């Protein structure tokens, strides 16, 4: 079997397609022929040596795939050979095949292309658990998505709108602003041309956002607290602008606000299974109804993983880049 391995730490040129051995599926596990693998910023961090895979996960990157079930381990009851599924992985998705627990998979939603379905599991699970579990987003509240054109952001905008929130998001440039509106955003702030804090306050009549979903991290911490409404919740899921930032505790206390940081990859299989079950119940129907859809920027061959990383690092991607074996 071929997989994209990391030969040393550094630039995307260190990614190499090589032959690897994959274990047979154990009890409760399934072997999947990969149709497509999603490319995430976590993969870039892993390539740079900053985000190692958890114990027991394959060494090669890839956190989500779509594909067809090829073989079943003992005791598998929810999947059959030939089923089209998506899977949430701790690693190993940049490959022709994966082995994963059956409870880490979901059926491909009706009406979604098998290849494009790989753009869903990581982004949808991240958006759901952070908006609903961590952010406690409620119908009628205002959600600010920092980076509505990203892989998670493009899903979070759609999901927030479907949950009844008024969604404000940020994007860079007129074209990306317009595309974010088509995803369901009520207001879009062009962060290249506008003051984000002032624009969000204007869009919310001065009240601010009840929930802020942030991929920027330290560099945006001060402004994210400034745009929170009273009782607001800031949920940090990315560090694109660094690990540290200035936190005005007096402002946070006056607003009775909270700051939460989360990751998905390091959670236990049981936690991930619970998130996937909630997604199956609450989000998959939205997908089959056409109210939420995968957003795919480009499909590239598995051998072009280095180009996929370069593309994602360029900042020009809208939605997801997929690798297709």
Image (spheres, rainbow, N blue to C red):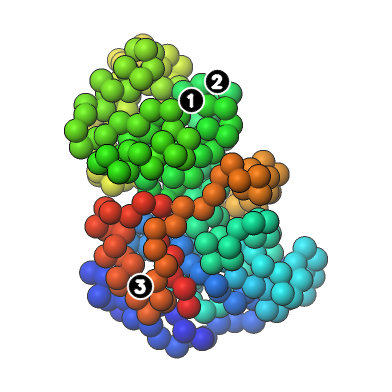
Q: First in sequence, mark 3 or 2: give its number.
A: 2
Residue 69 at x, y percent in the picture = 67, 73
- Give 263 or 63, whichever is nearer the viewer: 63
Circle number at residue 305: 3
Q: Secondary structure at mark 1?
A: strand
Q: First in sequence, mark 1 or 3: give its number.
A: 1
Q: Residue at x 44, y 57 (%)?
A: 296
In the drawing, does residue 53 fall left or right of residue 87?
Answer: left
Q: Nearer the viewer, mark 1 or mark 3?
A: 1
Q: Distance of mark 2 from mark 1, alpha carbons? A: 7 Å
Q: Residue at x 25, y 44 (%)?
A: 242
- Give 325 or 271, whichever is nearer the viewer: 325
Q: Is residue 238 visible?
A: yes
Q: Distance of mark 3 from mark 2, alpha carbons? A: 41 Å
Q: Which residue is mark 2?
A: 140
Q: Distance of mark 1 from mark 3, alpha carbons? A: 37 Å
Rendered position, 175 above or below 138 = below
Q: How many marks?
A: 3
Marks 2,1: beta carbons within 8 A: yes
Q: Residues within 10 Å of mark 2 (few under 14, many from 20)?
A: few
Residue 198 at x, y percent in the picture = 25, 20
Marks 3,2: beta carbons within 8 A: no
Q: Which residue is mark 1?
A: 166
Q: Secondary structure at mark 2?
A: loop
Q: Is residue 73 visible?
A: no
Q: Residues within 10 Å of mark 3 (few under 14, many from 20)?
A: many
Q: What residue occupies the far left of the structure in this picture?
A: 193
Q: Residues within 10 Å of mark 1 (few under 14, many from 20)?
A: many
Residue 223 at x, y percent in the picture = 27, 27
Marks 1,3: beta carbons within 8 A: no
Q: Secondary structure at mark 3?
A: helix
In the drawing, does residue 221 fall left or right of residue 19?
Answer: left
């Amino acid at each position: 079997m071929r997989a994209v391995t990391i030969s040393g730490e550094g630039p995307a040129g260190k990614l190499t397609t090589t032959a690897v051995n994959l274990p047979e599926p154990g009890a409760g596990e399934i072997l999947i022929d990969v149709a497509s693998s999603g490319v995430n910023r976590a993969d870039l961090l892993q390539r740079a040596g900053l985000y190692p895979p958890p114990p027991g996960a394959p060494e090669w990157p890839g956190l989500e795939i779509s594909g067809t079930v090829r073989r079943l381990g003992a005791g598998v009851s929810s999947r059959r050979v030939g089923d089209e599924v998506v899977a949430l992985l701790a690693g190993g998705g940049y490959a022709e095949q994966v082995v994963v627990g059956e409870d880490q998979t979901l059926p491909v939603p009706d009406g979604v292309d098998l290849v494009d379905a790989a753009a869903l599991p990581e982004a949808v699970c991240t958006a759901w658990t952070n908006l609903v579990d961590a952010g406690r987003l409620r119908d009628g509240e205002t959600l600010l998505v920092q980076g509505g054109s990203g892989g998670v952001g493009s899903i979070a905008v759609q999901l927030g709108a479907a949950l009844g929130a008024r969604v404000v998001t940020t994007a860079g440039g007129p074209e990306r602003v317009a595309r974010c509106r088509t995803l369901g955003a009520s207001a879009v702030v062009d962060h290249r041309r506008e003051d984000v804090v002032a624009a969000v306050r204007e869009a919310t009549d001065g009240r601010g956002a009840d929930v802020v979903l942030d991929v920027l991290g330290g560099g945006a911490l001060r402004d994210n607290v400034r745009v929170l409404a009273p009782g607001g919740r800031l949920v940090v899921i990315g560090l694109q602008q660094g690990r540290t930032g200035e936190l005005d505790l007096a402002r946070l206390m006056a607003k009775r606000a909270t700051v939460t940081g989360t990751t998905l990859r390091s959670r236990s299989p049981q936690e991930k299974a619970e998130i996937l079950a909630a997604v199956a119940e609450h989000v998959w129907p939205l997908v089959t109804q056409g109210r939420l859809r995968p957003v795919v920027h480009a499909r590239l061959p598995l051998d072009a993983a280095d180009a996929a990383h370069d593309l994602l690092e360029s900042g020009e991607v809208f939605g997801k880049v997929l690798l297709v074996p």
